[in-house]
Amino acid sequence: MSQLSLIKKPIEGYLDDFIKLFNDSLSHTDGLLSQVLEHIKSRGGKRMRPMLILLIAKNYGGISSVTQHSAVGLELLHTASLVHDDVVDESKERRGQASVNAEYNNKVAVLVGDYVLSTALLNVALTNNTHIVQSLAELGRTLSNGEILQLSNIQNSEFSEEVYYEVIKMKTAALFEACCEIGAMSANATEEDLEKAKSFGRNLGIIFQIRDDIFDYYDSKEIGKPTGNDMAEGKLTLPVLYALNSTDDNEMKTIARKVKSRDVSQEEISRLVAFTKANGGIEYAEQKMLELRSQCLQFIDAESVTEEIRIALTAYIDYVIQRNK
């Protein structure tokens, strides 16, 4: 049985209900808005975050309509943030397809992102759970804060892993942390269980981002971005940070600073990518993922209420680590 099949097994049926509710929330009769929403729905991906919410809820008591509306709200908030991020980053692709801003324009992308965000708030309001509403609102603030921190870090001449992790914790890790918190909240988990679930989600989110960052050092059409795309956007991720700090190569540091100032050539990016791979950057990042995996497994072994959920959450972690896009 594939990892995805193992992940879905405890939530069969519930995931289908989520997908229907999500797609219905993004249905509209207006011409242009309808077109853009269909474009967004067509790149839905594996639904990793909703599956995590459903699994955590199942573990702490059961999946309900509160869980489903929470999952739709969070996924819509995430979707809106991606639409807006593509405008900020001037990205032309998302998951191998044209981004909304590339397919239409920045004005349409911003306005549709606002519409999706409002729809997220509508769905989470339907939970009638003020704690879940508050959690999602805090997530939106944190994601925005993370984007601003990332932009300000571009001006920082240092190559800091600490800042790298700080940005992740306000972006991808915050998203996965909220998945676990909201899933547990929807099942009326105790405060102690909420804290454990949040810590698990945070570690899982860091793993997810490190894997995403490793992709940037390899060229693959499946991934949906060319080699060095993060660097082209002014971002220095964990593998190159390790290579720079462990070798103290002044020439490469000069190129890295050019990356931050968005004044770097493609040839220089290629050199920095090759330097990173030659100096253990990828291996270092992979080791960090394995260390975090060990922490995640401790949570799973201690907190899983059934063998089926234990297997599903373990498969979830391994899928995140081993995925190729």
Image: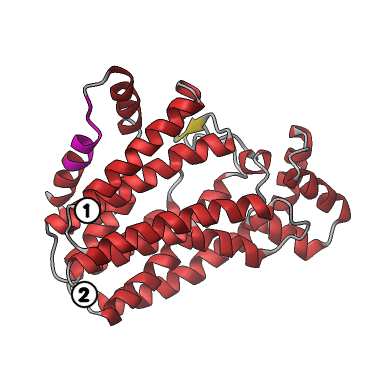
Q: Is residue 96 above or below residue 199?
A: above
Circle 1: residue type: Ala
Q: CA distance from mark 1 to mark 2?
A: 20 Å
Decide whether the magenta segment is chiefly helix, strand or loop.
Answer: helix
Asked where in the image residue 22 lies, by quadrant, the reply is: top left
| Residue on which disc 2 sits | 189
User: Going 24% across and 53% down the picture, which residue do you hit?
Assistant: 124
**Camera sees residue 5:** no
- Left of 217 or right of it: where is 298? left
Q: Is residue 210 above or below residue 310?
A: above
- Secondary element under disc 2, as helix, strand or loop, is loop
| Residue on which disc 1 sits | 125
User: Going 51% across and 71% down the picture, which residue do you hit?
Assistant: 291
Give the percent coordinates (x, y) of residue 46: 32, 44
Range drawn in magenta: 21-28
Give the percent coordinates (x, y) of residue 214: 57, 50
